[in-house]
Amino acid sequence: MSDALKEDAALLFEAVREAGELGRSLTRRSDLQRWTKPDGSEVTEGDLAINVFFEERLKAVRPGYGWLSEETPDDPAERMKQDRLWIIDPIDGTRAFIEGRQEWCVAVALAVSGRPVLAAVYRPMRDEFYSAIAGEGALLNGSALEIPDSGSLEGANIAGNRKALASLSHHGIAADPSGSLPLQLRLAYVAAGRLDGAVSAGKRNDWDLAAGELLVIEAGGAVSGISGEGYIYNKPDPWQQGLVAAGAKRHAALINALRMT
C-alpha cells in the first residue's frame, strides 16, 4: 500500500467515525428539521450537517479529488475529470434516523479509476465500524472479516427488496425483506457473515453501494448487478443496475437463479 493511500485511509476512517458521532449527537434533538426531496425521499438537518462536515474534512483537504454525495448537487463533468473520487452517503437509513432507531449508518468510499480502494461504514448506535482497504482485507472494529460461503441457496438468509426476493422464492432461500436495513448495512452484514447474501432489483445509487461493495470483496465475496456485471463508478449516471452480493460461490448461484426467472 502506498504512503498516499495510507494517508487517505487514516483521513477517511477518522472522518467517518467523527461524522457518526455527530449524527448520534443530533439524534438527541427533538426539534431536528426534515424535508421531502423531489424524488419523495426524506432529508434532515443531520444529513446536511454531516455532508458539510465531510466537505470540510475530505473535500477541502483533497481538492484534487472528485466528489459524489447524496446531499450535494452532482456535477458529472467536473467529477469525471478526476481519477480519484469520494463517494459519500452522509446518512444511509434516514427514516431510521428520523424515528430514533438504530438502523442507520455513515458510509464513504474512495474510488480510483472507477473502483473502490478505501471504504468505511459506521453504525454509531451500536459502535460498529466496518473498514476495508483494497488488497488488505475488511475489518469490523479491528477484527478481520471472512464470508462463510456455499454454492447452495437452500436455507440461505438473503436480504433484499420484495421484487428480487420473489424471483428466488422457489430456490428455498430464507427471504429477509429487511425493509428497515439500508443497503450499506446489508452489504456490511454480508461481509460480516450476518447475512448470506443481499439482492436488489432496479437502479441503485453509487453512494448506497461503493463502500459496502469493497467490504464484501475484501471479506472474500463478490458483488455485481443483476446481470452479473461488475460495477464501475464515476460514470455520467451515478447508479448501478441492481445488486447481488454474497460469498463467491453463493453469488454465482444467485446470478444463475436470477437469470432463470
Image: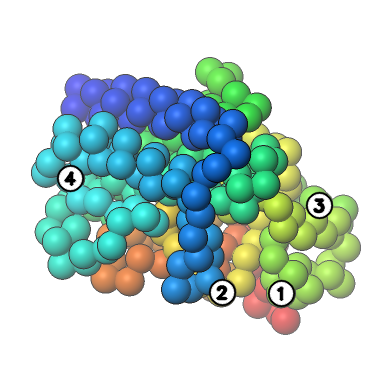
Circle 1/circle 4 CB separation < 8 Å: no
* Residue type marked 1: Lys
Q: Is residue 67 above or below residue 124?
A: below
Circle 4/circle 2 CB separation < 8 Å: no
Q: CA distance from mark 4 to mark 2?
A: 29 Å
* Residue type marked 2: Gly
Report whether 62 appears left or right of 197. left
Q: Secondary structure at mark 4?
A: loop
- Front position among marks 2 and 3: 2
**Residue at the (30%, 56%) spot, across then down:** 72
Query: Mark 4 highlights which residue?
Result: 65
Circle 2/circle 3 CB separation < 8 Å: no
Query: Mark 2 highlights which residue?
Result: 202
Q: Secondary structure at mark 3?
A: loop
Looking at this rendering, what residue extends furthest in the top direction?
142
Circle 3/circle 4 CB separation < 8 Å: no
Query: Mark 3 highlights which residue?
Result: 156
Of the numbered discs 1 and 2, the one sitting upstream in the chain is 1
Query: Mark 1 highlights which residue?
Result: 163
**Residue at the (45%, 35%) spot, across then down:** 120
**Residue at the (23%, 35%) spot, across then down:** 56
- Front position among marks 3 and 4: 4
Looking at this rendering, what residue extends furthest in the front direction?
31
Q: Secondary structure at mark 2?
A: strand
Q: CA distance from mark 1 to mark 2?
A: 9 Å
Q: CA distance from mark 2 to mark 3?
A: 22 Å
* Residue type marked 4: Tyr
Q: Is residue 213 above or below residue 218?
A: below
Q: Is residue 221 visible?
A: no
Q: CA distance from mark 1 to mark 3?
A: 17 Å
Of the numbered discs 1 and 4, the one sitting upstream in the chain is 4
- Front position among marks 1 and 3: 1
